[in-house]
Image (tube, rainbow, N blue to C red):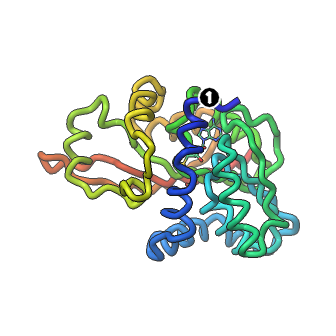
Amino acid sequence: MTEELIRNYWNARARGYAIATVNDADPEDTRRWRGVLEDVLAPLEDKADVRILDVGCGPGLFSLLAAERLPNARVTALDGSPAMLEELKASAEARGLLERITLVEGDAGTIDEEGVYDLVMSRNVLWNLPDAEEALKGWWRALKTGGTLLTADGNHYRYLIDATHAAAVAAKPAPKSHDPKIFGNVDPAVMAERAKTLPLTRELRPDWDVRILEGVGASIASLSTSTTPAPDGSPVVTDFTLIAKKTA
Ligand SMILES: C[S@@+](CC[C@H](N)C(=O)[O-])C[C@H]1O[C@@H](n2cnc3c(N)ncnc32)[C@H](O)[C@@H]1O
């Protein structure tokens, strides 16, 4: 079951996060994510009954884009926050996609399906999980042989433990989802305090992700990173998108 503090935090952020990423998203961001997903969705367009899992779907940016792009797909959208799922439900209904998006309140850390999905995708979720390694291995098991995993995430709380990273991100503009108007009355310190003891805060990513995935036999199909300069000019990785194939 999703930890209470984490669930409450995301319940409180659901409305603002939906506004920032779906309802009133920057069209340039949406266009960019549509392009990222195209690499994993286009190969599925002629396949019958495609099954997709969006882990930690939030208000549904990925679920909605995938269901829109592939009329032959059914998307399982799983999240631990009921308020996030309500946001996705409203958006899916408004776009006529709800019939092909199944909403599941569940724990991203304990996916127990095996060999079910053609595509498992997730954005900005692993960093938030108390046992990220077990979670990622569970996502991998949920894939069919021949399936694809797309995970987009970042070193979001590394600033807590790495002064160079902290200096680099301090010089960068905050994302729209962190705009105080969007954040509402949620106290960001609550998650920052929790993140101090989350395992991925202390791991350099995407190196960690590559290591865990290669350990389960994944072949890394593509990896792209966004960087920002540290005060000495060296690049620090803020975000990344990794695509891995399950060939056996
Ligand atoms: C940063 S938001 C990302 C939402 C969505 N993937 C997106 O990119 O717009 C993190 C999401 O992960 C969900 N989450 C965090 N821990 C979870 C857990 N253990 N099980 C299921 N969902 C979880 C939160 O409820 C929240 O919706």
Q: Is residue 72 left or right of residue 227?
A: right
State which image quarter holds ligand 1.
top right
Residue at image coords 56%, 34% = 6
The one of 153 and 18 positioned closer to us in this rendering = 18
Asked if residue 67 is positioned above or below residue 126 in the image, the reply reads below
Asked if residue 139 is positioned above or below residue 60 in the image, the reply reads above
The one of 18 and 225 positioned closer to us in this rendering = 18
Provide residue 163's location: percent of width, then percent of height: 21, 34
Q: As shown in the figure, which amino acid type bears the numbered disc 1?
A: Glu
Residue at image coords 41%, 32% = 201
Residue at image coords 41%, 39% = 187
Provide residue 236's location: percent of width, then percent of height: 28, 46
- Near mark 1 (Cα within 10 A), the count class, few <14, some 14-19 or many ≥20, is few
**Could you tell me which secondary element the residue under label 1 belongs to?**
loop
Provide residue 237's location: percent of width, then percent of height: 34, 48
Residue at image coords 68%, 72% = 42
The one of 27 and 219 positioned closer to us in this rendering = 27
The residue wearing badge 1 is: 3
